[in-house]
Amino acid sequence: MKTFYYVPKDEEVEPHIAESAIWGITIVHGIPERLLKEFPDITPSKAGILKVPEHAGISMIDSEINVNTHQAVIWENEFCDLREKGTISVFNTRKKEMIYEDLTPVWCEKHRARWVFLVPSIGKYEVSFLHDGEKLETAIFFAFKRKPAFLGGVK
């Protein structure tokens, strides 16, 4: 997370310089437009230390995976505490069926969680990342039936 000392536009910056110097953080006078576009909920009412999330996203083993292998996904979201209420649902859009619903993570930190699950059949899969039942992000991957690559030796 990035840390700033926030001062609203209608306040003077001078009274807050000493405190921001003690903490060694820069002063931000008003919320920059680019931050408001990316994080519209950040609107502090008074001057103080403001933490702005930097990392949010999804990573997977691969966006194309073999059937009957395991897919692993990591969800990183510095806005949410994922330890208790972070789950995923996996939907096969080709078959129009829910494969896993409200799957809990294999391991979880405060802002990162990892899930591993078996991919049972071919198709386009949509992984929904939920926090307290509310869908926050979605990732897509494809499952195919492929023959293993030839590793050498006699065929």
Image (spheres, helix red, strand yellow):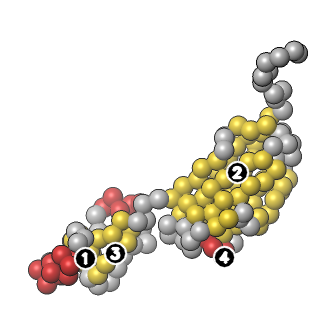
Which residue matches tag 1? 23
Whether residues under marks 2 and 1 lie with C-beta atoms below 8 angstroms apart, the answer is no
- Is the residue 145 above or below the residue 73 in the image? above
As shown in the figure, which amino acid type bears the numbered disc 4?
Glu
Which circle, 2 or 3, is nearer the viewer? 2
Distance CA(mark 1)–CA(mark 3): 12 Å
Distance CA(mark 1)–CA(mark 4): 31 Å
**Residue shown at the point (63%, 63%) measured from the top left:** 113
Between 154 and 52, the one lying in front of the other is: 154
Quadrant of the snapshot with the N terminus = bottom left
Residue 28 locus on image (x, y percent): 23, 69
Which circle, 1 or 3, is nearer the viewer? 1
**148 sits left or right of 47 in the view:** right
Residue 89 locus on image (x, y percent): 75, 60
**Residue shown at the point (60%, 50%) measured from the top left:** 59
Which residue matches tag 4? 84
Going from the N terminus, do you reach mark 1 or mark 3 first?
Answer: 1
Q: Quadrant of residue 63?
A: top right
Which residue matches tag 3? 50
**138 sits left or right of 26 in the view:** right
Going from the N terminus, do you reach mark 2 or mark 1 first?
Answer: 1
Q: Quadrant of residue 40?
A: bottom left
**Residue shown at the point (74%, 48%) measured from the top left:** 71
Distance CA(mark 2)–CA(mark 3): 33 Å
Whether residues under marks 2 and 4 lie with C-beta atoms below 8 angstroms apart, the answer is no
Which residue matches tag 2? 72
**Residue shown at the point (83%, 17%) measured from the top left:** 153
Q: Secondary structure at mark 3?
A: strand
Going from the N terminus, do you reach mark 2 or mark 4 first?
Answer: 2
